[in-house]
Amino acid sequence: MVTTRIDGTEINQSKIVDQIRCLGIDMIDAAKSGHPGIVLGAAPIIYTLYAHYLKFNPNNPAYFNRDRFVMSAGHGSALLYATLHMAGFDLSLDDLKAFRQIDSKTPGHPEYGVTPGVDMSTGPLGQGIATAVGMAMAEANLRTRYKVVDHYTYCLCGDGDLMEGVSYEAISLAGTHKLNKLIVLYDSNDICLDGKVAQSYLEDTSLRFIAMGWNVITVTDGESIEQISKAIEEAHACTDKPTLIEIKTIIGKHSALQGTSAVHGAPLTKEDITDIKEKLKVRDIPFAVSQNVIDDFRYLINTRCENEETAFNEKIESLTDKEKQELSYFMNEDKSIFLKELIYEPPTDKNEEAVRITSSKLLNAIVPNFPYIIGGSADLFGANKTYIKDGGVFSPEDYLGKNIYFGVREHAMGAILNGLALHGFRPYGSTFLSFSDYLKPAIRMACMMNLPVIYIFTHDSISVGEDGPTHQPVEQLLSLRTMPNLDVFRPADTNEVIGTYKVVLEKTTGPAAICLSRNTLPILETAKANEVERGGYVIYDSIKKPQGIIISSGEEVSISIEVAKRLRTKGLDVRVVSMPNLGRFLKQDDEYIESVIPVEVRKIVVEAASSYSWHGLIFNSKYLITLDEFGASGKKDDVHKKYGFDVESLEQKIENLLR
């Protein structure tokens, strides 16, 4: 591909590619750490994309209608940073020199919110490509709703990404939804960290993608800017399918170790770097950059992109005031939603309700009113009660559908929710609490990126009964509670569910997990929705100074209150504390914590889950009535009795502890 300036002078594109390569390997050499193989092998791919196709504004990396680029092969961070620097983003040579150093703008793997031009944090393989599917779903929704939003989502992935199961799950869903604005550039070099890919991966990737409804294009020469460009043009012409462009490359191109796994994840020798630069006719001086080369690269970018943001802003003016207000929510960082009123229809026949039913009522009252709330279930709409009536189904026929059928793809669901959140949505996904393990890596990424994703986990206890230990969560609450930046709620009744949704929706950033019982629970007269924000509060108090305090969460709260009432008739005056959010409670000031659980009063935890959540409050294990073994299949009451969570067993245990 020959590219010329307006004045007729020709731009040497190979020089730009080689400059990117050499900057990348200089960064890795300076850090004495990194992955030179992808830098040398995939530089023509990322150059072609940024120089000729990617729509962006280096002076405003958050420009909303930009094309999204996901470096799913996150170990290629040096390649990305070198490109961003040369493209004009706010990344200096000093930033490149600080690659992989503490508190730098160039961490070992791309981090969202740290490096200008990085659209998501990547590193765990498969997460990037799966999240890109969520970004493409978001774009399809917004393009349909507002017309003015119209951009591509590009993703650079490698063999490792396509081996991970999460990518398979997400790729399948992308094909189902005909996300034609999603283009995956596959750096196909036949090498993985342990050696040749063929040792563990023999399938025909192209046929797999075709079978899942994708358009597939093959580029036989990964050094050819012309072939890569032609493939991207063909992808743009495809109107009913996402596109995979398989680009055959040589890992570590030009290195003495090219074509081997040895060049994947270790710095090159000084001699090899010198030889590479001699071959490429680049000065053998670390971080030496030709200003002419940078000027050429930026010229190509600016001639395409300089008016894109202005044109987009002008298009926004064509929207109605209501549409402008809605779109501004997607474009702004503040993701809080304040409800003027929360419409909830209480049960008419009796004072009890399954909290998953309460959740369903609230979702159906809230979600239809906000275009930026969207969600779904991993094939459990009927059980999770998260289906929005009259909300429509997200599909190629209706990208505005509120209900996403994720299928049995919990991991992809988690990553896709991240993609939706990165595009300004307040998304939610649902499954059983025991299956939260399947999407834990994606939850972890949401926590790192501080994304306002909501996870609705039902069937949160051994009380699911007959389904047995595979469906009875024990360690999952602990696992979620220990994840940094995850707000974990386990409400005890309808009132606390209302308080939970209020707190979660008013959060400006960060993910939250709402863990809900399947069972019908009493609506407690003393439960307080407005106390959920503090994490814990007194829900049933003693008449005088308590002789003991029972701390519970979720469905164990109503059981604990019944136990406390029975103990009062025996002369033991006990307080019950509901703890819908342990993490929030532990962050309260000392005065409040002391008012709820005074130091001098013995405290007993009742929760049918792992004891390890509670060691920050309880220092003697005999006061932990918890569960550190798997459950059993049987009727709910029989399972409770077997593990000591029925009222009679708890009454006896707690009386013995307090006498």
Image (spheres, rainbow, N blue to C red):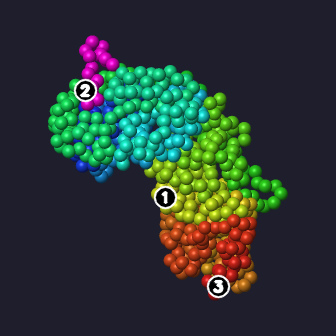
Asked if residue 241 is positioned above or below residue 345 in the image, the reply reads: above
Residue 68 or residue 279, whichever sits in front: 279
Mark 3 or 1, nearer chain start? 1
Image spot of residue 259 (x, y percent): 31, 38
Label 3 to label 1, Cα distance in Å?
A: 35 Å
Q: Amino acid at mark 1?
A: Met
Label 2 to label 1, Cα distance in Å?
A: 46 Å
Left or right of 84 in this view: 527: right
- Please tell me whether mark 1 sits on a helix, a strand or a loop: loop
Left or right of 43 in this view: 199: right
The quadrant in which the C terminus is found is bottom right
Q: Which residue is mark 1?
A: 483
Q: Amino acid at mark 2?
A: Lys
Q: Residue at x 62, y 72 (%)?
A: 606
Image spot of residue 153 (x, y percent): 47, 32
List the single residue furthest toward the top.
8
Label 3 to label 2, Cα distance in Å?
A: 80 Å
Tell me, yes or no, whether the highlighted magenta stretch contains residue 8: yes
- Please tell me whether mark 3 sits on a helix, a strand or a loop: helix
Magenta span: 1-18
Q: Residue at x 58, y 48 (%)?
A: 410
**Could you classify mark 2 by the number of other residues whose Cα lies within 10 Å: few (under 14), some (14-19), or many (20 or more)?**
some
Residue 274 appears anywhere in the view: yes
- Please tell me whether mark 2 sits on a helix, a strand or a loop: helix
Residue 418 or residue 149, whichever sits in front: 418
Q: Which residue is mark 2?
A: 15
Q: Amino acid at mark 3?
A: Asn
Return the mark for residue 656: 3
Image spot of residue 496 (x, y percent): 65, 59
